[in-house]
Amino acid sequence: MKLVPYLVIALATITSTTDWQALGKQWWAHVQFLADDRLEGRGMGSAGFEQAASYMAQQFEAAGLAPAGTDGFRQPIDFDVVQIDQPQCSLGLLRDGNAEPLKLGEDAVIGVNAHTAEHIEAPLVFAGYGLRVPEMKYDDLAGQDVRGKIVVYLTGGPANMPGPIKAHFQSGEERSKTLLKAGAVGTIALQNPRSAEVPWSRVAAGSLLPRMQMSHPGPRTLPSLPISITFNPAHAQELFAGSGHSFEEILADADGDKPLPHFPLMVKVQARVAVKRSQVKSENVAGVLTGSDPALRNEYVIVSAHLDHLGIGEPVHGDRIYNGAMDDASGDASLIEIARAMRDAKAAPKRSILFLSVTGEEKGELGSAYFAAHPTVKGRIVADINMDMYLPLFPLKYLEVQGLGESTLGDDIRVVASAAGVEVQADKEPEHNRFIRSDQYSFIKKGVPALAFKFGYVPGTPEEKTFKAWYSERYHGPADDLSQPVDLVAAAQFNNILERLVLRVADADKRPEWKADSFFRRFAR
Ligand SMILES: [Zn+2]
């Protein structure tokens, strides 16, 4: 009983001597460098990205990390670039032989890839959520012939399907695998406005950015669908005219957790697609703190963030630079600060800790996928702790953890956060699929337990408003820049919690494991 007050005093002493403000400023200085206009939004292949990569390498070295790339701290990767040439494209509906032109950018946008067809004309079928999940005995394609057709689907999934399953089967990779197998030639995605993160204007602007693929993706990579279209939900009714169903009715069914109907649509799509192709080199940046235990040092705990952002794009209020201060300069700054704090504390963890700043996240988690397929370290990767726009916009009282219930890493973050007086929350918005929407998923698919984070809040509070407004006003827009309000003290406290988490995992007797009932356990060999 006497230990308790003693412990409280001890902890209070530690926290009262920590100058969070100073640590926060140190963290912010890295964000300021990486998200400065001079770095051009860190688009892959740009001089700005190269400066960012040099900065990370220098900072890793200054923090005492050893180079862990294939060329010093760097791991160069070749990418093929495809960018839509929108003025040369056309999109229209064919109804009873009559052509109805659509306005690209306003009615719909075309997503291109290396396999995009130059010309396509195909009938449409509405297939609910467009999902086929054998283990849930759920099949939106059942009884439908989608061969040669474009599958129109609503984003999301049935309410009774567990979040991780829904998320996994909604990933681009799984969708094209299933639909290609079924013989479909394309998709039209209809975003449920209820779960839209950004306004349509930003979807349209994003579609004009270059798309990338690894030049040497490896033999097991599947081709993509010949065409993928995203339709503006505000105009989606045009697709349903004459079908006996309305888009409104489908949204009402989805929002009321009722099963969605499946039916042919009375229109065909006609598309002509022109693209510009090029090549780009980019790289991951990796540094290692080698473990102190002769046996365990061959096991690696990865701490990751992504270095690329959207670069220069469509202007919004005259600003063309997509700085990506939170997305994800914040995470790179945390990588540096965590490495530096470990050096200052003379940390000697048993396992090795690999600090990894990856490229190509915004293009589909490409740099992390490349690293997971071609690790630069010999040994076993046992965990990935990923930081991608964790959003330190208000004081750190709650920490939302993606993957909390999936592996023993969830137990670790609970212990570490509660010691810091921070309450852990599970993902409050599983419909946003965040657990599979950043680099941790590249490692999860290789069987590696992982976590990702967001600052948490209690629904109905001003913090919720701040959090949601950030998405609608700044996410993937030029306003994610250095002029936004950020809580530096909270960011420093987050870094400290992450440092403790990583050290705890690196020092544990046993390596992290998936929970017996985790969906993601299937990827572990
Ligand atoms: Zn992003």
Image: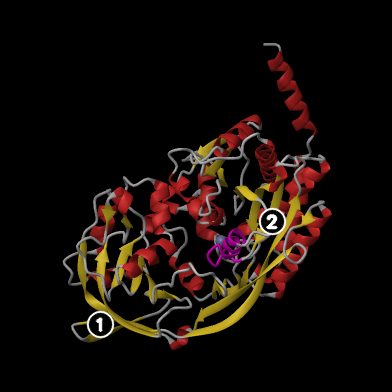
Q: Position of residue 310 (x, y in %)?
A: 59, 68
**Along the horizontal axis of the image, is 77 left or right of 81?**
right
The image quadrant where one finds the N terminus is top right
SS for tag 2?
A: loop
The span shown in magenta is 360-373
Q: Quadrant of ligand 1?
A: bottom right
Is residue 361 on the magenta stretch? yes
Q: Is residue 120 in sight in this rendering? A: yes
Image-based side of 199 in relation to 271, left or right: right
Whether the magenta-drawn stretch holds residue 365 is answered as yes
**How far is disc 2 from disc 1 in space, using C-alphas?**
54 Å
Quarter of the rendering containing residue 376: bottom right
Residue 212 location, quadrant: bottom right
Estimate how packed mark 2 is, as few (under 14), some (14 to 19) or many (20 or more) residues with alpha carbons within 10 Å: some
Please determine whether, in this image, residue 254 is positioned above or below residue 40: above
Please name the residue that numbered disc 1 is placed on: 94
Q: Which SS class for mark 1?
A: strand
Mark 2 in CB contact with mark 1 (< 8 angstroms): no
Residue located 61% across and 39% down the image:
511
Residue 377 numbered mark, or none = 2
Residue 501 vs residue 302, the one in the foreground: 302
Residue 177, position in %: x, y? 38, 65
| Residue 106 is at least partly visible in this image | no
Q: Nearer the viewer, mark 2 or mark 1?
A: 2
Q: Which residue is located at x 71 percent, y 21 percent?
A: 8
Total marks shown come to 2
Residue 452: x %, y % from top left: 56, 48
In-image side of 100 versus 40 (left or right)? left
Depth check, front residue: 344 or 400: 344
In the rendered structure, the answer to whether residue 200 lies left or right of residue 376 reads left
